[in-house]
Image (tube, grey):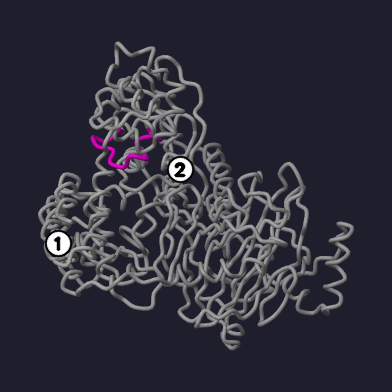
Amino acid sequence: MNPIYLRRRAKVILPDGTGSTPVNVLAALQKNIESLGFLLSERVIEHLKALDPLKVDSFYQRLVKELQVLVGAHRKFKPFYPNFPAQVMEMSEAALYFNAIMHYWTGFRPEYESAERPELNEQPKYRIIDLGTKDDFESIFTLLAKSKSPFSPQDKDDVKWFVAQYRDSIRRLLPELIPCKENLAYLGAELIRNAPEISPVLDAHVKTATDVLRLAVALSDGDVSLATAGKFGKLRRKERALLLGWIERAESRTEDMLRWKPRWIRLGERLHPGEYAERFPKTAAAFDVLRNDRKFETFNSAVETNLTKRDTRAVLTLLATRPGKLARRLDHLARLDPSAQTIVERFSERAEKVSTPVLLQVMTHFRHRNEPGKLRTFFPKGEIGNLFATKTPLPKLPEEVADSVVAICERVLVERFAQLAPLGTCYLDPRLKNYLVPFAQRSAAKALRTLVRGSRLSLPECSTLRFFVWWKNGKSRADVDLSAAMYDTKYQYVDTLAYYNLKNFGAHHSGDITDAPNGAAEFIDVDLARCAENRVRYIVMSLNSFTQQPYCDLPECFAGWMARTRASSGEVFEPKTVVDKVDIASDTQICLPAIFDITNREVVWADIALKGHPRFANNVHNNLSGVSLVLRAVTQLRKTDLHTLFALHVRARGEEVATASSAQTVFAVDQGLTPFDLDRITAEFM
């Protein structure tokens, strides 16, 4: 069994055996993992029957350990008030206030006897663990390497594991094409470190000077998106020669290097290009231009000069050689040129050279281009998941221009997808309209279920949402506060559940804990019906590092939410009722994991980090402006959804049918290719 396989595919690999394990042992095993919210498939059970009991026990011990980590049950949860939520409901405001003050002043926590709780009488939807194969497991690495979207932190860890384990034999799992440059840099660095014998395989993939810069950054464990600068570590002589050789054969090397001039000057201090001037003369000349500020006209400077002159014809002539840049500047050019249709025609001529992710984003942008009243939202590149939003609308374009661009993108995409293998009859789940295409997951948090920001999931049948957080001190005292900010249907602020307001609107906080040397936990219960009666529509789950350490400095911090029907039954933390759990490890002090839409019974995946630094205490009240902005921006997103993407594939290479049972290929929320199969989507459908 491999934790990667279990987490990504909900599958395990079992050894062959000739033994026999009694059914009652397997029944006990099944019952125990049921308490964590999982069940073994019939195929797994049948295989376990033929194994020696010692092998079954070894499998069970490892399985339980991994499942506990997935749902958070590997830690003990002890809230301030152990008989939560009833205890908080019954206590007076004065008693709650007194206990809080005593805790803040002295660190004292009153000892309460834990009352007997009714057994949990709920049947959540269990996650099924199936039997897998080695080939299927190894395909995970190949799909990740083929991804057209930047790696998430979890992807990076998995790629690192594969390369470290397989070393030189990883060659057979490498795809012919590694399309994402950021992924190429990270994977290339791991190959250089762990499989030096096959590092020449990178020759076919490293084509530009910027590719080399990203590789050097990856070798120094930096941000391969280049959104933030970092320090370069020492490079061995063999590595310096390898990087300089790639620069030497790159086209437009000087122009590429000037785009990141300060970083290349710092990298040059590690590469020592002067020592290799005879071997790599073109590279030495490029560094000479950078270091001595020699005059050199670049492509981008020529484009910007002509844009300043509003000479769109000259810009079009330049951008025709770089279709991707043309696509990204299409809206700007269409606004500058009175004859916008000319711009569209030139785009039509070059669109087939534009990558699929860019075409999808251009198509969606122009489809919603003239919609009034919505925030324009941008997710900045980098390793921290934040956003920028503005109310300022773009100047309107003629509808026929926007429609023409959309039609061009659709035509090119359908023609491109038609060249792929046939899908046969296809079922397309309408609910996929609520799930977004994973264009960039570089800052996605590690989670029980990884999704794209802005995606909407249906809430399970429940009357109470129970939020939770668990954390442990790092080098000093750490106080992480769990809060819930409430808003009405017009995004007007209603109230907050937090350490300074433990109960209101049928919602209750388990009590504030300010120190966690051995780990600490906080909970919030939200009564959905009571909140709806009090005009609450949106609830934003918020985590604030009150002691202002970034979460990346804590040894462990995770949060999530449970769906409960009888809030006082079962334990306060019941693993089988955990719907989502997310690791909080970003370099920030404020995190908003999810937004709950009570009216539509949906959870909107946010996974947003705020970078604000409040003047006073770092709590949700002093960050409400940022919380409100994130709420509006994430719930009003206009991004490409999976239904749109898969519908284009069906048009190109399949035939849509009305039911999943009659389809050869199923695109759905809970079967076939699902929104949670991000590696397959980014590798095979984008």
Residue 598 on the magenta segment: no
Given residues 21 and 614, the one toward you in this image is 614
In this view, 404 is above or below 159: below
In this view, 579 is above or below 529: above
Given residues 85 and 604, the one toward you in this image is 604
Q: Label 2, on which residue?
A: 4
Q: Look at label 1 and name its amino acid.
A: Val
Return the disc, 1 or 2, that comes first in the chain's sequence: 2
First to last magenta residue range: 174-187
Q: Look at label 2 and name its amino acid.
A: Ile
Asked whether the viewer can see residue 48, the reply is no
Residue 263 placed where, x, y %? Answer: 44, 33
Q: Quadrant of residue 210?
A: top left
Residue 416 placed where, x, y %? Answer: 14, 53
Residue 19 placed where, x, y %? Answer: 47, 37
Q: Secondary structure at mark 2?
A: helix
Q: Residue at x 75, y 51 (%)?
A: 516
Q: Is residue 255 left or right of residue 656?
A: right
Depth check, mark 1 against mark 2: the one in front is 1
Q: CA distance from mark 1 to mark 2?
A: 45 Å
Residue 98 placed where, x, y %? Answer: 88, 71
